[in-house]
Amino acid sequence: MNMKPGRELDALIAEKVFGLEVEWKEGFGSKEVFPVSRLTAIPEYSTDIAAAWLVVEKLKGREPSIAYEGEKYGWEVSLTINHEIFCIYGKSAPHAICLAALKAVS
């Protein structure tokens, strides 16, 4: 999966990882559309490390490890699923965490 960091990826994480029902709402006084669940804004999982850490907590038991692999590759998250190791790369640590989480739940 090659999704870019942003609100679409955040909404997918909310749905697939956290099991939330997500809908899109227009921002107050703007044309910006953002994902919400039960009228609460979805955290910016794919761009905010604090929010991404909530995703890591959901991956417990899948042995995620996070490492910076340099400018050429960016950030790597390795995780074990059914005794198979997957390495997922992202532009940032939160991005890589979200992509790995989607792999883990698929």
Image: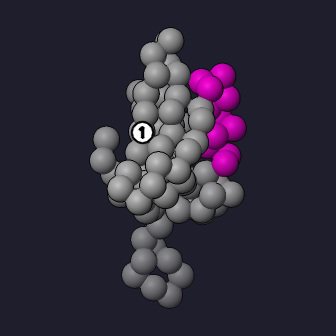
At 63% from the left and 58% from the top, the residue drawn is 49
- The image position of residue 16, as x and y in percent, is 48, 37
Is residue 54 visible from the viewing direction of this image?
yes
Q: Quadrant of residue 86?
A: top left
At 67% from the left and 48% from the top, the residue drawn is 53
Mark 1 sits on what residue? 88
Q: Is residue 98 magenta?
A: no
- The image position of residue 55, as x and y in percent, is 61, 43
Quarter of the image for the C terminus: give it: top left
Q: Is residue 90 above or below residue 44?
A: above
Report the front residue among 89 and 68.
Answer: 68
- Residue 13 is left or right of residue 38, and the answer is left
Q: Which residues are magenta?
A: 53-63
Report the front residue among 15 and 23.
Answer: 15
At 53% from the left and 62% from the top, the residue drawn is 47
Element at badge 1?
A: strand
Q: Is residue 54 magenta?
A: yes
